[in-house]
């Protein structure tokens, strides 16, 4: 893993600007949510992932155990129907 350090000056309102090259790399833009994680070394900033995208990506990993593709949307709908009665 390559480590890149970027120095930024804190503005008068306590804000920093995330450089365009970093925003592009992370795939974030105006109005996007980011997660700030406080770790021993400092603060880690990462894009907020859509939970359904995470599950979809996770389910798409082929470990050789799945014999067929999982339709996540149908699986969730079936689970919701089993738990709730919709009127």
Image (tube, grey):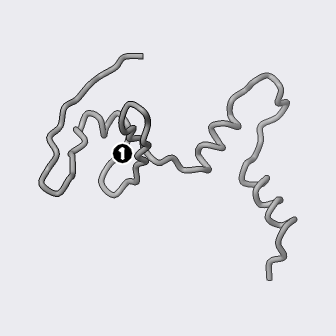
Outermost residue toward the top?
1
Q: Position of residue 27 (x, y in %)?
A: 38, 40
Q: Which of 12 and 67 is in front in this view?
A: 12
Q: Where is residue 83 in the image (x, y as percent from the top left)?
A: 84, 67
Q: From the viewer's perspective, is residue 79 above or below residue 46?
A: below
Rendered residue at 36%/35% (across/down): 42
Q: Is residue 36 left or right of residue 56?
A: left
Give the labeled residue for mark 1. Answer: 28
Q: In this view, does 59 lie to the left or right of 11?
A: right
Q: Is residue 10 left or right of residue 59?
A: left
From the image, which quarter does the C terminus lie in?
bottom right
Rendered residue at 22%/38% (across/down): 19
Q: Position of residue 77 (x, y in %)?
A: 77, 60
Q: Position of residue 68 (x, y in %)?
A: 82, 34
Q: From the viewer's perspective, is residue 70 above or below residue 40?
A: below
Q: From the viewer's perspective, is residue 64 above or below residue 44?
A: above
Rendered residue at 14%/41% (across/down): 9
Q: For residue 31, what is the image quadrant?
A: bottom left
Rendered residue at 72%/54% (across/down): 73
């Amino acid at each position: 893993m390559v480590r890149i350090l970027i120095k930024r000056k804190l503005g008068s309102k306590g804000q920093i600007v995330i450089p365009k090259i970093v925003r592009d790399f992370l795939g974030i833009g105006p109005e996007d949510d980011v997660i700030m994680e406080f770790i021993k070394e400092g603060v880690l900033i990462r894009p907020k992932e859509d939970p359904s995208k995470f599950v979809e990506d996770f389910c798409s990993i082929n470990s050789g155990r799945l014999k067929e593709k999982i339709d996540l949307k149908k699986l969730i709908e079936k689970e919701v129907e089993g738990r709730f009665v919709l009127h």
